[in-house]
Image: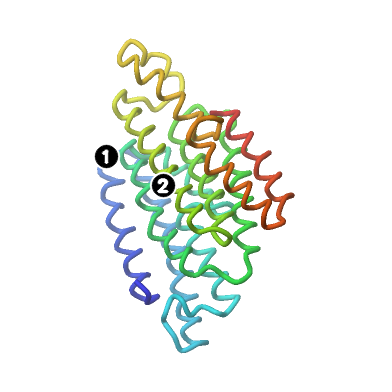
Amino acid sequence: STHWYLAWMGIEINTLAIIPLMSQNHTPRATEATTKYFFAQATASATLLFASISNAFLTGEWDILQTPNTLTSSLITLALAMKIGLAPLHSWMPEVMQGLSLLNGLILSTWQKLAPLYLIYQIQPTNSNIFITLGLLSIIVGGWGGFNQVQLRKILAYSSIAHLGWMILILSFSPPLALLTILIYLLMTFSLFSSFMLTRTTHINSLATTWAKIPILTISAPLVLLSLGGLPPLTGFMPKWLILQELTKQDLAPIATLAALSSLFSLYFY
């Protein structure tokens, strides 16, 4: 959609559609996760609608591409960042993921990110500082938050935050590279969740017992985890290497260095 009101309606339908799936287990943890998700998404949606109406009032346009006002574009970016769980608006994400089943966690980590990410891509502000700040904070928080976690769903939630940080960091400089990053992230996340669903594993200590059930998964799961961490020569290393190269070409070597060092946190807990 190129109309803010229609885009907002689409995101709301997308949010309301997943809430029954999240609460279908009828356990206290699932109910709590669903409630937290609803309140976080409702706050982001209200902010997005307010910023869209403000933009229409100032410019007389509902067109998504006509968002020249710095304040409204920043508000819209922050609202969409909250929808996908970018730092510093990420605090709902690990708690919600922990209360969901693996299948719903997979949907939340992949499909639910696509619509807000596309809107962020469409409204790219002329000043890229907000993207750089959100990206760096997400990479640092995603790496730091994963320390001492033993629940696989929380580890994957912090992994999601960190990878979205890499994507947002490069989005204003090279959209095709951001697309490559998100595609590789989706592929690896789908592989990991599928492995955990097959073995019904939700705790990191349970991975040790999977050898007796499915030996090939015991070998492949750690490789996919290390690939998510960006260890060369695995697939996950390629987008990070290309992003660091692009940032260096844009004379942002200090930011590239900080992002590379922050990714070591993620690699450590993987």
Residue 183 is labelled as 2
Q: Is residue 7 above or below residue 20?
A: below
Q: Which residue is at a point 41% across and 18% down the rendered structure image?
A: 219
Depth check: give the residue in front, 42 or 83. 83
Quarter of the image where the N terminus is located: bottom left
Q: Which residue is at a point 31% across and 23% down the rendered structure image?
A: 199
Q: CA distance from mark 2 to mark 1?
A: 30 Å
Residue 127 lies in quadrant: bottom right
SS class, disc 1: loop
Depth check: give the residue in front, 82 or 198. 198
In percent of width and height, residue 236 lies at 50, 37
Q: Which residue is at a point 71% across and 44% down the rendered structure image?
A: 257
SS class, disc 2: helix
| Model colouring | rainbow
In percent of width and height, residue 8 lies at 37, 70
Q: Amino acid at mark 2?
A: Leu
Residue 172 is labelled as none
Q: Amino acid at mark 1?
A: Asn
Depth check: give the residue in front, 190 or 12. 190
Residue 117 lies left or right of residue 24; in this view the side is: right
- Determine crowd level at label 1: few under 14, some 14-19, many 20+ residues with C-alpha closer than 10 A: few
In percent of width and height, residue 13 lies at 29, 63
**What is the tally of numbered marks visible in this picture?**
2
Q: Is residue 118 above or below residue 192?
A: below
Q: Is residue 177 above or below residue 8?
A: above
Question: Pointer 1: what residue?
Answer: 25
